[in-house]
Structure formats: C-alpha cells, structure tokens
C-alpha cells in the first residue's frame, strides 16, 4: 500500500479506523501532511540492516555498507547494500509467483511456477560478487548525479538457484538469439503501471554461463524482500544492475535488449575515454560488461589506533569481474613501495578473494594503508580516479585507510 496515496484518498477516517481512535485535531492538519503513524517505517528494522549501514536515499530505498562492515567472507544480509530504482513490490505471494520466458528468439513462450522451477531443474550454489556499477561515484569531479556511493555498494553472498541456461534451453533458444532481458515486479516511482523502473539484461553468452542463476535463496534462506524475493537473477562479476530482482519474466532477444536503463548514459560509459565534463553522444556510449579489478580493506576500520611495536593484521577482499585476481599489494608510504599480501583462491569463479597481510610500522605517527589488486591479465587498480564518465561508473581507484600508531 502506498502510504502517501492512502492519506490523500481516504484520509483520516481510515487512519482513525486503523488505530481505533479519533484524530482529535484532524481539522488542523496541514494539507499534505502525513501523520507519523503512517510515515515510512525504520529502514533498519524493515530490512533487518545493521545500524551502521548508511541510507543514501529513501525514495527509492538505497543503502550502503561501510568498508569495515564488509569484513565477513560471505556477506550477511545485515551488511548487504540495497540499490532500488523503483518501488519494492508488496504483498508477494511466492505460491502464485511465475516466471515467463518469451521473446523473439524463444522457441516457446513458457511459464513456470516457482515450485516447477525448483522441481524441474537442478539447484546450484555459488558465492557471487555483486557490485553496483556506480560504486565509488561520490568521488567523480565534475560530480555525477545519482546515489553518492562511496565504497560500500558491493557484496558477495551465497546464492542458490537454478541455472538460467537450463531454463532457457527448456523453453528453447533459437539460433538468432543474442541477448536476454529481464522483467520484474517492482513499480515505477511515477506510479505509471506501464513503465518498468529497470529492465536490463546480458548477452546470451553471459546468460548461459554455469554461474548465472535464477536464485531463490541467499545465504541458505529465502532471499530477503529488498534483495529480490522470491526470485532474482544473479550475474556475478557484472554491474549488479544486470542481476534483476523480483524477476517474473525473461525475454530471449534477437537484438541487444532495449528495456529501461539499457540506453543513454544508464550503465553505459564512453567507448573511448573523454575529458571530465564532456557531453557524449549516445552513439559513442558502450554498455558496461565485466567489472574492473578492485579491492577493499575491511579490517581494521579506518581511523584505528595501533600500539607501537605491535604488528597490524589487515584483511579484505579483491575481485575482478569475470577475471581472477592474481595479486594484492599494500603500501604504507603513499604508493612509493608495495608489498605483496597473502591472497586466497576464490571459492568459485566470480566470487571475491580474500587477502591479508601483517604490517610493521617503523615508528609512531600517521599512516595510510593503500591496497592495490592486479587481475590475471596484469591490469592493476589506478591510484587516482579512473576515466571520468557522465554517470560516474567504474571507480576502481585504490582503497585507502588511515592509521595512527601511538
Ligand atoms: N527489479 C529490479 N532489479 C534490480 C534493481 C531494481 O531497481 N529493480 N536494481 C539493480 C541494481 S542497479 C543493483 S546495483 C542491484 C542491487 O542489488 P541489491 O539491492 O540486492 O544489493 O540490483 C539490480 N536489480
Ligand atoms: Mo546498480
């Protein structure tokens, strides 16, 4: 129920009805004022998030983690960022939920209930890294519009579901298929039921990968509502906008999917780099695919006080889209010299990798710890902001934390 409309339409009679009391001074309520009783509930309670999570927007809900909250190897719900483009669907009934496969390149249009998907296809579980394409946007200059993500729009949870490939093949994929596009149950902020807030997709090759899931569980439980209950697409290693939540349709396309937020500057960057602030023609913008190499120091928390003569253990995660991370290094002298960290292999393809190191500081004072990951192709994170783009995507500059040795 949309609480604002609710107040507009049937107003205070209904309010009085729901609380079973008269609103005594109802004739004094300023027009348009929403009584506290009907205002948006506490997002931390609503989404079961930790109180250190940071709300960036409430219409729609967008929330990010701080670096030190992401220390777990597998991200629990309470620390998982939320990125919504529209309104979260309400009153979902998983027992009547369906997924329809259609599109020009589908042999058959086919509809599956959730139960049919679970019964008919084999389940798989993978740890999959999901990073919002706009993570790090807040640092671009000139600034880019949109949620001002700092470092916390990334997660790596355990996702369980069926392979998208198995479902697509069951419906039948024609030889001219090149792309898939998702359709979902969230609604446009304008309230227009004919407008999708977002309908993105991936090339067929990505859709057919082993790890591309139609997931119904996150970390061994039903997916939390904000993260796509009861069914979501998970395309690890790509901008997380490709991982549609609340999925009820997949179209098999004979052209690049042209749904909402596939064109213009949405999730697209200049094909060739441009100087900051340049206006770029749509024709010269390219869709973001695999995300670039990146890392995050998750312990200690920036600002930590360290005792002199005590080695400091640092740890964090590194990821590189479709690629593996080959090396993570740290520096305590502003990038003059680098030291190799211990790096673990990924639990599976498209999962982030954990790194750690033990650092000795020469004497008391202020230090910064910088981390830099390098992918299997030898490409490293930049120490300064990478290529400016109109919407502020793909900032994979080195993460830095401040330390005081006392
Ligand atoms: N249906 C739907 N799917 C969606 C979105 C959305 O607004 N609606 N946002 C996308 C974007 S931009 C991101 S970054 C991820 C965020 O996933 P999360 O909220 O589970 O962390 O969901 C993607 N899937
Ligand atoms: Mo995103």
Image (cartoon, rainbow, N blue to C red):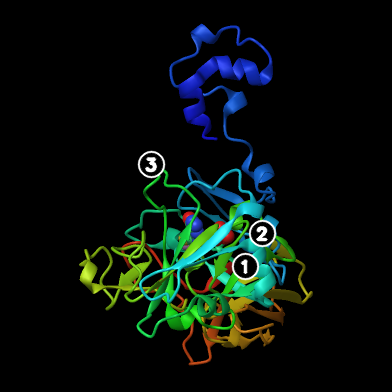
Q: Please state which of the two labelled residues, at mark 1 or mark 3, is closer to the viewer.
A: 1
- Asked which secondary structure carries label 1, the reply is strand
Question: Where is residue 24 shown, x and y percent of the image?
Answer: 60, 7
Q: Earlier in the sequence, mark 2 or mark 3?
A: 3
* Residue shown at 21% from the left, 71% from the top: 283
* Residue shown at 38% from the left, 76% from the top: 105
Q: Quadrant of residue 236?
A: bottom right
* Mark 1 Cα-neighbour bin, 10 Å: few <14, some 14–19, many ≥20: many
Q: Nearer the viewer, residue 25 or 221?
A: 221
Q: Nearer the viewer, residue 335 or 202?
A: 202
Q: Classify mark 1 as within 8 Å of ligand 1 or not, answering yes or no.
A: no
Residue 215 image label? 1
Asked whether the viewer can see residue 213, the reply is: yes
Q: Are marks 1 and 3 in contact (CB under 8 Å)?
A: no
Q: Quadrant of the C terminus?
A: bottom right
Q: Which residue is mark 2?
A: 223
- Asked which secondary structure carries label 3, the reply is loop
Q: Is residue 368 left or right of residue 313?
A: left
Q: Are marks 1 and 2 in contact (CB under 8 Å)?
A: yes
Question: Where is residue 388 shown, x and y percent of the image?
Answer: 33, 69
- Asked which secondary structure carries label 2, the reply is loop
Q: Which residue is mark 3?
A: 190
Answer above or below: position of 13 versus 286: above
């Amino acid at each position: 129920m949309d609480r604002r409309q609710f107040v507009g339409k049937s107003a205070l009679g209904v309010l009085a009805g729901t609380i079973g009391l008269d609103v005594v001074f109802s004739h004094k309520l300023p027009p348009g004022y929403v009584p506290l009783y009907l205002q948006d509930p506490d997002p931390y309670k609503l989404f079961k998030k930790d109180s250190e999570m940071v709300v960036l927007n409430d219409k729609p809900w967008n929330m990010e983690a701080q670096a030190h909250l992401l220390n777990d190897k597998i991200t629990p719900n309470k620390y998982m960022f939320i990125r919504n483009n529209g309104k979260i669907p309400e009153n979902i009934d998983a027992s009547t939920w369906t997924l329809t496969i259609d599109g020009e390149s589908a042999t058959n249009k086919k509809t599956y209930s959730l139960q049919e998907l679970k019964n008919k296809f084999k389940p798989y579980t993978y740890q999959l890294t999901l990073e919002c394409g706009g993570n790090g946007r807040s640092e671009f200059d000139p600034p880019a519009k949109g949620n001002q993500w700092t470092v916390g729009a990334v997660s790596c949870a355990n996702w369980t579901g069926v392979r998208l490939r198995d479902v697509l093949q069951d419906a039948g994929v024609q030889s001219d298929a090149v792309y898939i596009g998702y359709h979902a149950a969230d609604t446009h902020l304008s309230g227009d039921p004919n407008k999708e807030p977002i309908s993105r997709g991936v090339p067929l090759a990505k859709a057919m990968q082993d790890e591309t899931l139609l997931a119904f569980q996150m970390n061994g439980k039903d997916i939390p509502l904000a993260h796509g209950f009861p069914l979501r697409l998970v395309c690890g290693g790509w901008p997380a906008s490709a991982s549609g939540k609340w999925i009820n349709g997949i179209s098999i396309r004979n052209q690049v999917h042209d749904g909402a937020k596939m064109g213009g500057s949405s999730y697209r960057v200049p094909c060739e780099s441009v100087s900051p602030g340049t206006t770029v023609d749509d024709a010269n913008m390219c869709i973001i695919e695999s995300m670039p190499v990146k890392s995050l120091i998750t312990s200690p928390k920036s600002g930590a006080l360290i005792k002199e003569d005590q080695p400091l253990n640092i740890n964090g995660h590194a990821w590189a889209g479709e690629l593996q991370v080959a090396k993570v290094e740290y520096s305590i002298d502003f990038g003059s010299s680098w030291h190799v960290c211990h790096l673990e292999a990924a639990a599976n393809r498209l999962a982030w990798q954990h790194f750690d190191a033990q650092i000795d500081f020469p004497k008391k004072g202020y230090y910064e710890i910088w981390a830099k990951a390098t992918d299997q192709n030898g490409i490293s994170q930049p120490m300064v902001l990478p290529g400016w783009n109109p919407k502020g995507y793909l900032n994979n500059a080195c993460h830095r934390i401040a330390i005081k040795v006392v």
